[in-house]
Image (tube, coloured by chain):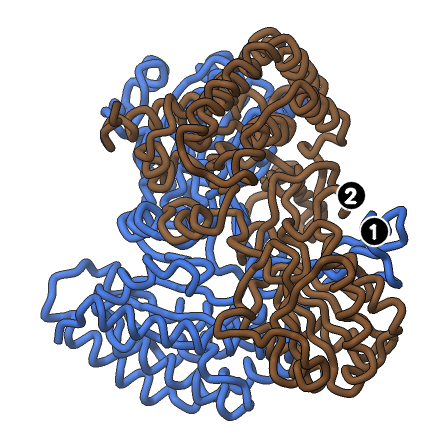
Chain colours: A blue, B brown
Amino acid sequence: MHVTADAATAWLRDAATSARAASASLARLPGAVRDGALHAAAAALRDAAGAILAANAADLAAFNAGQGSAAFRDRLVLTPARVAAMAQGLEEIAALPDPLGRTLAEWTRPNGLLIRRVATPIGVIGMIYESRPNVGADAAGLCLKSGNAVILRGGSDSRHSAAAIHAAIAAGLGAAGVPQAAVQIAPSADRAYVAAMLGAAGLIDLLIPRGGKALVRRVQAEARVPVLAHAEGICHTYVHDAADPDMARRVLHNAKLRRPGICGATETLLIDAAVAPALLPVLIADLAAGGCTFRADASARAICPQLPAAREGDFDTEWLDTVLSVAVVDGVDAALDHIRRHGSEHTEAIITEDAAAAERFLSGLSSAVGMWNASTQFCDGGEFGFGAEIGIATGRVHARGPVGLEQLTLYRYLVLGHGQVRP
Amino acid sequence: MHVTADAATAWLRDAATSARAASASLARLPGAVRDGALHAAAAALRDAAGAILAANAADLAAFNAGQGSAAFRDRLVLTPARVAAMAQGLEEIAALPDPLGRTLAEWTRPNGLLIRRVATPIGVIGMIYESRPNVGADAAGLCLKSGNAVILRGGSDSRHSAAAIHAAIAAGLGAAGVPQAAVQIAPSADRAYVAAMLGAAGLIDLLIPRGGKALVRRVQAEARVPVLAHAEGICHTYVHDAADPDMARRVLHNAKLRRPGICGATETLLIDAAVAPALLPVLIADLAAGGCTFRADASARAICPQLPAAREGDFDTEWLDTVLSVAVVDGVDAALDHIRRHGSEHTEAIITEDAAAAERFLSGLSSAVGMWNASTQFCDGGEFGFGAEIGIATGRVHARGPVGLEQLTLYRYLVLGHGQVRP
């Protein structure tokens, strides 16, 4: 049944109001109580495994009637092991340090006022995601731990699964005595709820879209609420002329082929003209042996004529696959210029033994993450030591790079005096 | 001449594109060069004082034909002293520590990767302001110092003044060899430019509105770009039953009457029922002697019958004047409940000698600033030690409280390895 814009907006207003109250309660609960709620939610997910798998079967049955790809279907599928992993994920979040209440800075003014900046929850997070049903559980866990309420809106393909997962988490919160309004889900996958969330200025504090480029771009373009996201990761590995050739081979192979489908995978190889004649053929052979194909510019093809020519737009493409764009450049500034024209401000790496070149490259980047002699696939909350992440942000306010618990907080000030008045 | 939406959008696209390039240049300039540009802009403002005052005379002539208040007209007026103060403001900003390049955090992972979080500019700031022409100069100064480009859109009443100030600053940037596109101003005060800025997702990174509640609320509701602002400051001073009476008198008098028109001025007195019979009459007498008038609830009027009764909405009103709302409450939780229903999450203070009560009050607040035994008028970037501020934020992402240079930055990551690959 179609949901009208008015009905969706009215639902959201009520949901966000109760979510705000729930967040205020969460913020005042000791960390141990929030952790207890995460453990209760994990237990509830395990208890509800049968119901969740049955709901997932309904989603899969409806999906078979459609015509999505096998990869898309795989993202939908839940198994007993995947449900167990969701529950374990909540327990792992519970084990992380409490991001709330930390003193971020503290100083005393000449008049004796002590000013303290302390970490607080953001408030109400809106999470718009697509097919992977586990995203809802992960988001709920990270938000609960950081004292935020979350309003979930999953994709229509996974709607039964998402609702069953939400019901289990809500039951866990109830059992733990934590407000169930802290984790809510849109009543259906109707698009009217997405529109309501995009327009929810003052109701939702932050939107986090997780899914394909089209979804993220739409949210970024239309939201009247701040957005934390990245639309794509067109990541570059730049092999500088002072690169250690063995390191370049090892790091590039990993950056491209370890998992080609993640956003931190390298999509473009830039290589200095000075070393390309000797090194490019070796790099290409390594990657080709690993199943990689290529789109090369004219200079690269002059060295490796067997490479297919890059077409218009190839250097602006996030392949998410065993495909690598290849361009020969003439030094650090040319590499930076290529990245500025074609990159997505996600993650770029330089491979070099020359510290001055690395410094010049890294300081010239505006990407969220710049790396020196490391695989771009390290751009990940777990690899950064955050324990868990809700996504990667490439925007210009609030947070950049992996978004973990710390990035789901803001701060407020305490000013401690003994009767000071302002002159 | 009316500007079409398409023309305003096209102008903004070009302006934001050159602004982004200018910000990238600024970010790479040494702090000394940015400071030099600020000094050059200050000199140019002094050189252009005659032209700025002539432009201001044109604004005032146009204004006299209208019908604004005397206070509104005063905000428009520039004098030689006010122009000199603008120039000096830029020099004071130049003297502050460089907010860029700071290492905000640094850690080493078990695999040996060194991860460093460094402060970077945000990028392109949009500043929408009303009558005070100096706001444009202050904003330009803070943005330049923090490596951001800024697009200004002043009010129609001050359009000649704003354009003359902008022209002087641009001349200063040119003289210093810094891209003039770093500070731009809308070609006219047509409202189409405001609409274009509000819709500039991906072009402008952050909007900062400065002006009346109506302007700020419109920007908050309609912007497709993150907003840093506060619509109003309904600040509370809560006199707890364990307050030192003399301190309560001194601090409340300052919080209300030092400058009643600033956003950190106290608008509402909350006083505990236990001490109100003895203390409220004294507090009221002090304030009345200072010219204050009152809007009191029934309990306060039972103690001080001469006080006018508060009407519907009075407790939700930012007076910005010598008016104080007064309510008697029954303890910390009742005070917090009043603040939750009527406050604006700006600044609230408790006056008490009881540390446990102060702790309970401060931890129960969600306001940007909570104070203990201090005047709410201390909510100010200068008083916090930030040197200068571009406004106060009460939102839930990026920054809260006074917005100074540090709050005009974000960060990115440097990951320094020696050939690590991800397992």
Q: In the image, what residue occupies the spot 80% across and 65% down?
A: B286
Q: State the mark number for residue A350.
A: none
Q: Which residue is mark 2?
A: B385
Q: Quadrant of the N terminus of chain A?
A: bottom left
Instruction: Return the residue found at the far front.
Output: B306
Residue B90 % position (x, y): 68, 24
Tags 2 and 1 both on a single chain: no
Q: Label 1 crowding class (10 Å Cα cut-off): few <14, some 14-19, many 20+?
A: some
Any part of residue A252 in sight: no
In the rendered structure, are the residues bearing label 2 and label 1 in contact, judged by CB atoms less than 8 Å apart? yes
Residue A376 % position (x, y): 51, 41
Any part of residue B267 in sight: yes
Residue B106 % position (x, y): 72, 45
The chain under label 2 reads B
Q: Amino acid at mark 1?
A: Trp
Q: Amino acid at mark 2?
A: Gly
- Residue sitting nearer the eye, B412 or B193: B193
Residue B280 % position (x, y): 77, 77
